[in-house]
Image (spheres, rainbow, N blue to C red):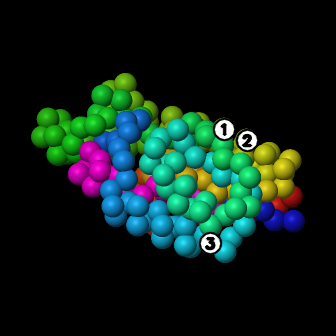
């Protein structure tokens, strides 16, 4: 028997729109972000979702809320911090352009897309991969034990590492991926 994981990014936030490092800060969905969440919901309308996961962040919760409007069969929502956005530390809330002006484009690129480079007091992609890996191990076990289809509302960087692990891709490839707001990544787990 196969069970399904549907993972998607939250809709656009005000920080996303203005090119700010959101990280662990809160930023609400823009009107476009709400429309993107509704589009994800429509794409998943005819899929069976038994259990849903969200991060503690408002953007994840609001996006999932739109999706679950079509899923009365979903009996449980679990909030899990392992799929939260990457923590950019002291860069959280700052504009990309501000960082480029202050530290240069090369340093910005290392902090923004370098796999092992940590922003000051923040996480690297390698750090995020560790917590996402723990979540995936838990998720596979949870699906096998409960025999359920799962929806996950997460953030772009956690999805990037989720894909890397599930698709067995290289870190070089993973850091280059753009995670669209309206794409659903679908994985099957055999039980």
Q: Which quadrant holds the N terminus? A: bottom right
- Is residue 178 something one can see in this rendering? no
Left or right of 36: which side holds 112? left
Compared with 81, 47 (above or below) is below
Q: Which residue is most to the top? A: 121
Q: Nearer the viewer, mark 2 or mark 3?
A: 3
Residue drawn at (72%, 67%) of the image: 48
Between marks 1 and 2, how big is the CA–CA gap? 6 Å
Residue drawn at (60%, 53%) of the image: 152
Taking depth in this image into account, of 74 and 188 the one nearest to the observer is: 74
Give x and y (percent) for residue 171. Answer: 50, 50
Disc with the residue nearer the chain's start (2 vs 3) = 3
| Residue hosting label 3 | 45
| Residue hosting label 2 | 138
Taking depth in this image into account, of 101 and 23 the one nearest to the observer is: 23
Left or right of 149: which side holds 182? left
- Is residue 67 something one can see in this rendering? yes
Q: Which quadrant holds the C terminus? A: bottom right
What stretch of residues is rendered in magenta? 6-20
Residue 141 magenta-highlighted: no
Picture disc at residue 134 = 1
């Amino acid at each position: 028997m196969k069970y399904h994981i549907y993972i998607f990014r939250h809709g656009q936030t005000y920080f996303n729109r203005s090119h700010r490092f959101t990280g662990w800060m809160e930023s609400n969905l823009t009107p476009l972000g709400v429309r993107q969440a509704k589009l994800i919901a429509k794409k998943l309308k005819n899929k069976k979702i038994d259990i849903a996961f969200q991060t503690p962040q408002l953007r994840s919760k609001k996006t999932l809320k739109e999706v679950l409007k079509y899923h009365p069969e979903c009996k449980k929502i679990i909030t899990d911090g392992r799929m939260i956005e990457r923590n950019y530390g002291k860069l959280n809330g700052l504009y990309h352009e501000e960082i480029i002006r202050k530290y240069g484009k090369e340093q910005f690129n290392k902090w923004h897309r370098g796999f092992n480079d940590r922003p000051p007091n923040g996480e690297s992609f390698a750090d995020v991969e560790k917590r996402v890996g723990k979540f995936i191990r838990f998720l596979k076990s949870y699906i096998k034990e409960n025999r359920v289809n799962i929806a996950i509302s997460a953030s772009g960087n956690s999805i990037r590492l989720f894909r890397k692990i599930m698709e067995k891709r290289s870190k070089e490839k993973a850091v280059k991926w753009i995670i669209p707001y309206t794409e659903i990544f679908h994985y099957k787990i055999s039980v």
